[in-house]
Image (tube, rainbow, N blue to C red):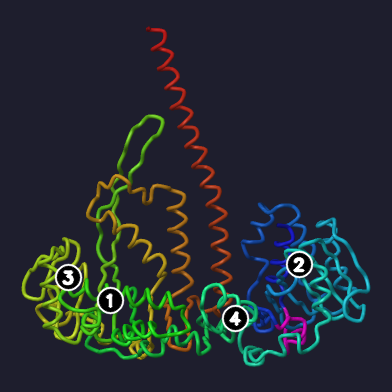
């Protein structure tokens, strides 16, 4: 654990500048994952932040183990870092094709003597590390190691390596790589490295393909090329938002199995916005050609990349599905997919206050108790584009006849199990738990206050789009936690909100998120995804994110104290109950 904390602390607390990645030759060609951290840009973006005033310093001083305090206070000072490290990039990598599987960090240093002085206190505390001098390429490296951990350096570069075994041998081998054995010989590294980004991560399947292509074919019958599938991720802290960009490049074999370019579309009908409210907390849009998707699934029956047994089972299952669908709903699966157009949209609003309950059981006394509370339950709205209203109407009528929990309010207007409403219009189906707006849709063909003037309409041109006004995690969690019991306020097994410390932590965390972050925009297309998380407070997004993390750490520190206090109070109550039970038993024995 000490080694891991040391490694993470070195990575996080660097602050320097950068120009090029000179140390890329130390990354093996067979690395599955490679990452870089642009410390020049991060340093510039955080220069207006006074790190000495962060709460994490007090937390470390008050609660961290002594060795961590010493490590941070003695080693990770600004002077120490500036005197030890050159102002360039941090590189990281992970590989499994070497002797034991290996991962590590590559750090640019000013000289061997300064780095030796920097790590000596840490090496002394770790203990039991073997030291080797004059090893590695040109006999220029000094290495400290045990079986799973190694630190090595020459006069220019330091490597920190973790491995299942033989960490020192792995490190020495990496120092002696030829260019054709390093990542510089791959067909992706030059394109991957982007100096405009703060963070970059690249994952490739090529090393897996080298190893497993033949094995996969021999033992499972899959005739799939696993090489040349690449995912690239970039993250950057901009002035008022965090930006991420993920690029996906798949080989032809994997593309033929997924074929997302055939069924992912970008179209949507603007009339769908009339079915969604104008005050959403969350909006999602997804464009899928359902008929094309179904045709792709059918085509897999003839895709010889798949083993014959899988293709035959797929064929049988689809034939069975068609028979059952024809029997139950009077149409084949293909006919069913043809009912729908290419767009699904969903929205959540703040909603209404409903009664909820907290149930508790005292295992000592056997007493049960309930506490009524009030919770906000978001209203939800789902709109599905359709091609043929009459066929959809007939379908719903049919499944109602077969026992589906649908109560017909009027033509093309249904109540579902007393919890939701379904409205069919000429070009969509609306499903919502908001009765008032369901009635508006039925009577007017649109909501009175709808999303037609959505200010982010231009972003709906992506295959998938997610918008959130606030903390989407808190919104959906509150919704799912409350929905189960919203129509059963005396639910026996609902323990939601029963832990005061956890409830307080959740509430404070959500407030902190709302303090520092605003809207989220997330897009997905056939070639990857992109996101924008906007920040509040007037500072750039890196400073605001550090402040948010710092306040969250302070909250977590307080939470531990609150939780301990709760446990102590509960223990005291339990002891009192036990004493009462003992006294009652003693009285009963005396009476008898």
Q: CA distance from mark 1 to mark 2?
A: 66 Å
What residue span does the magenta drawing correspond to?
16-29
Residue for badge 1: 319
Residue for badge 3: 328
The residue lying toward the viewer, choosing from 413 and 301, is 301
- Tell me which residue sits at (29%, 84%) in the image: 290
Numbered badge on residue 255: none
Are the residues at dot 1 and dot 2 in contact (C-beta closer than 8 Å)? no
Q: Secondary structure at mark 2?
A: loop
Q: Position of residue 273 (x, y in %)?
A: 25, 84
| Mark with earlier residue (1, 2) | 2
Q: Secondary structure at mark 3?
A: helix
Mark 4 against mark 3, which lies toward the viewer? 3
Q: Residues within 10 Å of mark 4 (few under 14, many from 20)?
A: some
Are the residues at dot 4 and dot 3 in contact (C-beta closer than 8 Å)? no
Q: Secondary structure at mark 1?
A: helix
């Amino acid at each position: 654990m000490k080694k891991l904390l040391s490694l993470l602390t070195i990575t996080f607390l660097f602050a320097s500048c950068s120009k090029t990645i000179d140390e890329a030759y130390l990354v093996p060609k067979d690395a599955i994952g490679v990452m870089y951290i642009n410390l020049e840009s991060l340093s510039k973006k955080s220069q207006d932040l006074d790190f000495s005033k962060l709460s994490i310093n007090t937390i470390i001083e008050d609660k961290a183990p002594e060795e961590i305090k010493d490590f941070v206070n003695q080693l990770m000072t600004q002077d120490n870092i500036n005197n030890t490290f050159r102002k360039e990039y941090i590189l990281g990598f992970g590989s499994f094709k070497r002797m034991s599987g290996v991962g590590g960090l590559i750090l640019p240093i000013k000289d061997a003597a300064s780095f030796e002085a920097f790590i000596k206190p840490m090496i002394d505390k770790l203990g039991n590390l073997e030291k080797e001098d004059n090893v590695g390429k040109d006999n220029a490296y000094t290495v400290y190691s045990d079986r799973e951990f190694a630190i090595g350096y020459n006069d220019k570069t330091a490597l920190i390596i973790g491995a299942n075994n033989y960490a020192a041998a792995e490190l020495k081998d990496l120092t002696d790589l030829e260019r054709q054995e390093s990542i510089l010989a791959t067909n992706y590294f030059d394109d991957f490295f982007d100096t405009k980004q703060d963070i970059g991560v690249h994952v490739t399947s090529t090393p897996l393909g080298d190893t497993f292509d033949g094995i996969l074919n021999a033992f499972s019958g899959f005739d799939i090329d696993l090489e040349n599938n690449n995912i690239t991720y970039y993250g950057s802290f901009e002035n008022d938002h965090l930006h991420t960009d993920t690029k996906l490049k798949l080989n032809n074999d994997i593309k033929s199995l997924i074929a997302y370019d055939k069924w992912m579309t970008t179209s949507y009908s603007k009339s769908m916005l009339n079915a969604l409210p104008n005050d959403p907390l969350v909006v999602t849009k997804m464009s899928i050609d359902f008929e094309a998707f179904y045709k792709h699934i059918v085509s897999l029956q003839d895709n010889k990349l798949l083993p014959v047994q899988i293709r035959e089972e797929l064929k049988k299952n689809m034939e069975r599905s068609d028979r059952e669908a024809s029997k139950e709903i009077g149409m084949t699966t293909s006919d069913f997919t043809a009912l729908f157009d290419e767009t699904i949209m969903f929205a959540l609003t703040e909603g209404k206050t409903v009664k909820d309950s907290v149930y508790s059981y005292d295992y000592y006394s056997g007493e049960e108790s309930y506490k009524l509370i009030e919770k906000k339950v978001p209203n939800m709205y789902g709109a599905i584009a359709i091609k043929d209203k009459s066929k959809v109407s007939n379908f719903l009528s049919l499944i109602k006849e077969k026992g589906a929990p649908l109560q017909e309010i009027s033509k093309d207007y249904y109540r579902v199990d007393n919890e939701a409403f379904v409205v069919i219009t000429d070009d969509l189906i609306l499903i919502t738990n908001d009765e008032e707006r369901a009635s508006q849709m039925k009577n007017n063909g649109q909501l009175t206050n709808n999303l037609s003037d959505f200010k982010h309409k231009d972003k709906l041109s992506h295959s998938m789009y997610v918008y959130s006004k606030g903390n989407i995690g808190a919104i959906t969690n509150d919704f799912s936690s409350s929905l189960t019991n919203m129509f059963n306020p005396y639910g026996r097994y609902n323990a939601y909100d029963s832990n005061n410390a956890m409830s307080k932590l959740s509430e404070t965390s959500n407030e902190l998120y709302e303090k520092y972050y605003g809207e989220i925009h997330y897009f997905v297309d056939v070639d990857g995804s992109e996101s924008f998380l906007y920040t509040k407070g007037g500072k750039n997004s890196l400073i605001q994110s550090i402040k948010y993390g710092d306040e969250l750490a302070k909250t977590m520190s307080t939470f531990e104290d609150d939780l301990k206090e709760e446990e102590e109070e509960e223990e005291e109550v339990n002891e009192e109950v036990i004493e009462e039970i003992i006294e009652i038993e003693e009285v009963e024995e005396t009476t008898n």
